[in-house]
Amino acid sequence: MCKSKDGAVMPSKKWNIIINIAITFGILGFVTLFCFLLQPFSDSDTHVPLLFVLAVFFVSRLTEGYVYGILASMIAVAGVNYVFTYPYFEINFAITGYPLTFVAMLAVACSVSAMTTRIKKQEQIRLEAEKEKMRGNLLRAVSHDIRTPLTSIIGAASAIIDTHDSLTEEKRMDFVKDIRSEAQWLIRIVENLLSVTRMGGENARIDKREELIEEIIGSAVLKFKKRFPDVEVSVDLPQELFLVPMDGILIEQVLVNLLENSVLHGKVTTKISIAVVEQEDRVQVFVDDDGLGIRENILPKIFEGNLQSREGEESDSKRSMGIGLSVCMSIVRAHKGNMKAENRKEGGARVMFWLPKR
């Protein structure tokens, strides 16, 4: 085993080769055994080449590169001729009709291998493109979000230093509170970026473990209350405890982002409610607030992470709708879930996400 630049543990090249070889011979061995078991129930062996072509397909699908699929193709052709073609347990390509049959089988098997490998590469390219798009959205959001609080911190600190003697105690405290508020926002950005780093590395994987959803929610609410102690938070959980496979730290970050967004975007939010609904194949989490809601023109692109703010009163709204929700969506999708946002009929906003239970 070795480690990537971001600290993720990766299999060594030698270990990868061993795994791919084991998969190749495991699949071929299984198909060979299956064909032997079918012999007493079949009058001919015409099904054998088709089953081995199917085996080559699975080898190509589950291994890396062209080598193992082509190797499986060649072994399949030789194996079918040696084991399942008369005269049995003897290599003989000279029988009438057999050369063309086995050349065709080899061509089909190699074509299947090449096509499957190409499809895998195209899928990898697509995933990389999506990852780069996410990174670009995050960079655009971060470039604005980091510059704005830093400017405010520098301005407030400069005012205290340059006009210290002429400032009243109340005014100095106002500047200090501004510095603290902007520093808290910077911490939030860093936490979001660390969350993306945990799941967005080239070889990183989501580390899912069975977690009690109520413990994750309780931890997120505790963090939120430290920053917004005056906002009431209620939690509605199912009566029976249940476990959900997830990366607890990442899902906790999702909940913290959603809670903070309810305040930063809702502006007049005084109450937030969290509800958990267990369904047959997934668990849904609802975060409702009594704030101003979400502008209709923002709803379709709320999770894109590159929303542009206007001057003045909407700057905080942009913050809540920018990097935070983009990170939330990335984390939830990495868990094979999804998110949705809407305005409530009774006022305020609702953001929900769901995670598979398996």
Image (cartoon, grey):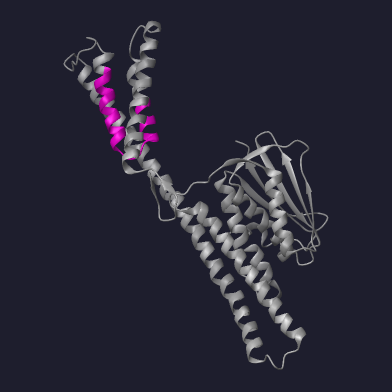
- Percent of width and height locating residue 219: 69, 52
State the image quarter where residue 297 is shown.
Answer: bottom right
> Does the magenta-highlighted stretch encompass residue 58?
yes
Please, what is the dominant secondary structure of the magenta stretch?
helix
Q: Give above or below for 196 relative to 213.
A: below
Name which residue lies at 74% across and 60% down. 225
Single out the residue that lies furthest toward the right. 346
Viewport quadrant of the N terminus: top left
Q: Is residue 307 visible?
A: no
Question: Across the whole image, how many numbered discs are drawn on residues?
Answer: 0
Name which residue lies at 60% across and 51% down. 249
Q: Is residue 278 visible?
A: yes
- Magenta segment boundaries in residue numbering: 54-80
- Percent of width and height locating residue 88: 24, 10
Q: Taking 153 as reference, is 265 left or right?
A: right
Q: Taking 134 as reference, is 157 left or right?
A: right
Name which residue lies at 18% across and 13% down. 95
Q: Taking 163 as reference, is 28 left or right?
A: left
Q: Give above or below for 59 relative to 125.
A: above
Name which residue lies at 24% across and 21% down. 78
Viewport quadrant of the C terminus: top right
Viewer-side residue, 254 vs 160: 160
